[in-house]
Each structure stands twice: as C-alpha cells, then as structure tokens.
Image (spheres, coloured by chain):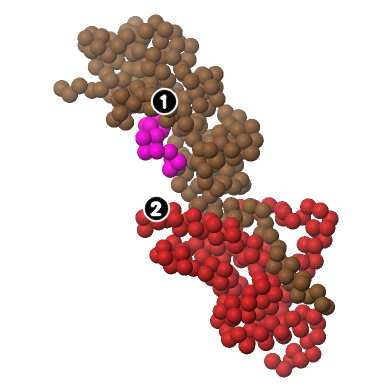
Chain colours: A brown, B red
Amino acid sequence: MITLTTDLKRLGEVKAPAGFAERLLAHVGMADSYAPFETVLGTVYVAWNSQGVSCASRSKSAADFEEVFRKDVGRPLVQVDPPKDLAAKINDELEGRHRLRFDLRSVTPFQQAVLRKTNQIPRGEIRPYGWVAREIGHPAAVRAVGTALAHNPIPYFIPCHRVVRTDGQIGNYGGGGPEAKRQILTMEGVRVNRIEELAKAGVRYQGVKTTKVFCFPTCHTGRHALEKNIVWLHDEASARAAGFRPCKVCRPAPQLSA
Amino acid sequence: MGTALIDVTERLFERMVREHQNRVFALGLALTGNRHDAEEVAQDTFLKAYRAMVTYPPDRIRDLKQKAWLHRIALNVVRNRARGIKPRMVELNGSEPDQAIGTEDGALLNLELDALAGRVSALPARYRDAVVLRHVQELSYEEAADALGQPVGTVKANVHRGLKLLRGDDDDHSDD
C-alpha cells in the first residue's frame, strides 16, 4: 500500500468541528454564550458568561444579535443550548424579581455606575436622568447619563426604560424607540398617559398633606395616599416652602441635614 | 496576577487555540479512532494548557514551543484515558455537525479517514504514538522523540514497526 503515508498525512489535515474554539473559549470564560429566549417582551437574545449576563437585544435573527454583540462587547461569542434554569431566571428578572448578575466589563466605570443605579429603580416606577446623575455623585452629568443609558448593553434587564426626561416626558429609548419605551413601561404598570399629562401641567412631584412628604409621582410609598390628601407640586423649592420634605425612598431631592 | 496580565495570557491562549485546534483535533482522532473522543481529547488538552498557562510568568508563556507542548499534553491526556483515569470533563455544549460533511465526496473522504484513524488507534500505544507524530502530524524524528521523551532510534524503530502493522505484514509481531 504505497499510499499509506499519504493517507496518514491526509488524516493530519482533518479539521476540528465547527465552533470548537468558541465552545472551548466559552468553557474557560473567555467567550460568551448566547441563546434566544421567549419572554414577556417576545424573543430576546441574551448573552452571558461566568460573570453574568453581558448583552441582550430583541434582534430579528442570531446573525443580527451577533452583530450587536460584536459592536457592544466584542468578545468571542458562541450559540449554545442554555442551562436549564436560565430561562426561568430571565423571566423572573423581567418580571421584577432580581435573579441575574450582570457583566458590565464592556463599559466605562461611569457607565457602570449609571447602569447599577438604574437597576435599583423598582418596576412600575420612573426617575428622571437628573436623579441618576445626582445619585451617582455627578449631578451635572445629566447628558452623560443619557448617553450611557442609550448605550446600555443589557436593555430590558437593566431598566433604562425607567429613566425619563427631567421635564417628565418619556423621552427616547435605545431598546426600540419611544413607542417601545411606552409599551414596556405600560406593561410594568406605569400609567404613561397620566405621567405625561402631569408633566405637561408642569407637575414634578406628588405631596401628601398628612405626612408632609413629597415623592416622584410613581413612587410606591405615595401610592396609597387618599386622593383628597394629595397636592401636586411643581418644583423642589415650592415643595419645601409649603413644608414638605423629600421622600427617603424615592429621594426626589437631597435630604437637608437637620 | 493582575488583570492586565490575565488579559495578555487570554489573548495568547485564544490565538493558540485558533492556530492549533485542527492539529490537536487531528492528533486526537488518530490516537482515539473516533471524532467524539477526539473532540474530548482536544478540549481536555487545551483546558490543561490553559490551567498551566495562567500559572506561568509571561516570559515562560512567550517562550513556549506551543506545538511540541500541546503534543506532549495530548499524549498524556490519551494515556490517562487509556488507564481509565476519566478526566473530569464537563460536556461542552453540543457539538455541531461536522463542517467537512457537505458534499458526497467530502462525506466519503471522511468515512475513509475515520476508518484509517480506527486502524491507527488500534495499534499498540508505542507504535501508534510514533506513527501518529511522525506521519499524521509530520513532526521530524527529533521533534517526535522530544515529545515522546524517547531516543530518536527508538522512535524510528517504532514508526517502522507501526507502518508495517498498518500495512498488514506483521509476521514478526510476536517477537517483541
């Protein structure tokens, strides 16, 4: 058999299976894994690694998502069968029960601070960009907060849709435009039309006469106030002048030290 | 180890995987005789390499003779499997169908190669390893001797004997 050594040589030219390198890199935590998930928001593509969820998008196809991931994160990426419990965790997270960790290494420390703060906004509530800026210790960086949220690599999960313009208008949304933002907020129980009516009327805060506390209109602590005890307030100064103090839960304004 | 250093190691590791994945997989196929085991061997080889690399100082990583190093690790992986030391392999998420199967010709070629891999893997280990390194991986006798930790003469003899066995004229097989 004269061809034996030639055949052996051909055996040496066999290729590794497709995706071998990516699966291996994913296993040692150097590549992210992804899969599509059916959620309350429809099909959402989600990428994750050992640090947590790193990217999400309502992409139309796997190829579209890979493109989003390449731009936003840039690590190697491989589509896999997800771990059994991940789908449940994803749905819990989207329904307001925190069960996921997030990997935000792809963004700057400032963006990380914005996103971590945004992740503290409860479902069913909204906050202005200026609030996020003040809470993370950069009260003047309102525009930068807007930019950071527009480039949120994990929309829906990190709820950048809950951050709205300081004048109360719902504002724009990187996760699918203003309409998608209104839709998601409505699904979460925010009365978007009412919020916008209040905003048009120049109202920023809701005060409760009996407690002398003022809140953002969606704050859950103010939700049970009787209609007759509610006063609508236009700004911090007039609220304080009328004897109201800011709510310690939604923190619509800094607490003044006594 | 600092984050930056880990980063450098990871870049080097990724490059190493992409550069050598086919070679290590082919080595696994020739040594084990089937694609499933070959993929496990290749995965385990790179995982062992990774675990070692993260403990190495940067200049040692830079000076690694990757090809020879990976061959030595792969041979050890196969030996350990043969001894029944089942490596703690986590099933990596599902293999995709093989990319080479696309045309009638491609499929046929694969079947032939797999049959040959089966015959090679069935050789006694010392002949198998020598033949695979010399003729499948096309190492020089010196490189093969280095990877096997044997004298060049021994490797030459084992290659010769291995090829003879593969050709089917093993009349003098019983004398060793």
Per the rendered image, the range of residues in magenta is A104-121
Query: Residue A33's spot in the image, x, y percent?
Result: 56, 46
Expressed as whole percent of the image width and height from the top left, the position of residue A177 reads 54, 22
Determine whether the residue tagged by mark 1 lies in a helix, strand or loop.
helix
> Where does residue A98 sit, x and y in percent of width and height?
44, 36
Amino acid marked by disc 2: Ala
Q: Quadrant of residue A46?
A: top right
Name the disc covering residue B146, or none.
none
Above or below A169: residue B125: below
**Does residue A119 belong to the magenta stretch?**
yes
Residue A21 visible in image: yes
Left or right: A162 in relation to B38: left
Q: Is residue A161 above or below residue A204?
A: below
Amino acid type, callout 1: Gly
Query: Horizontal placement of B147 versus B109: left or right?
Result: left
Disc 2, SS: helix
x and y percent of residue A100 in the render? 46, 40
Task: Say whether residue A84 is visible.
Answer: no
Q: Is residue A133 left or right of residue B116?
A: left
Real-space Cα separation, disc 1 to disc 2, in angstroms: 30 Å
| Mark identifier at residue A146 | 1
| Residue ID for mark 2 | B4
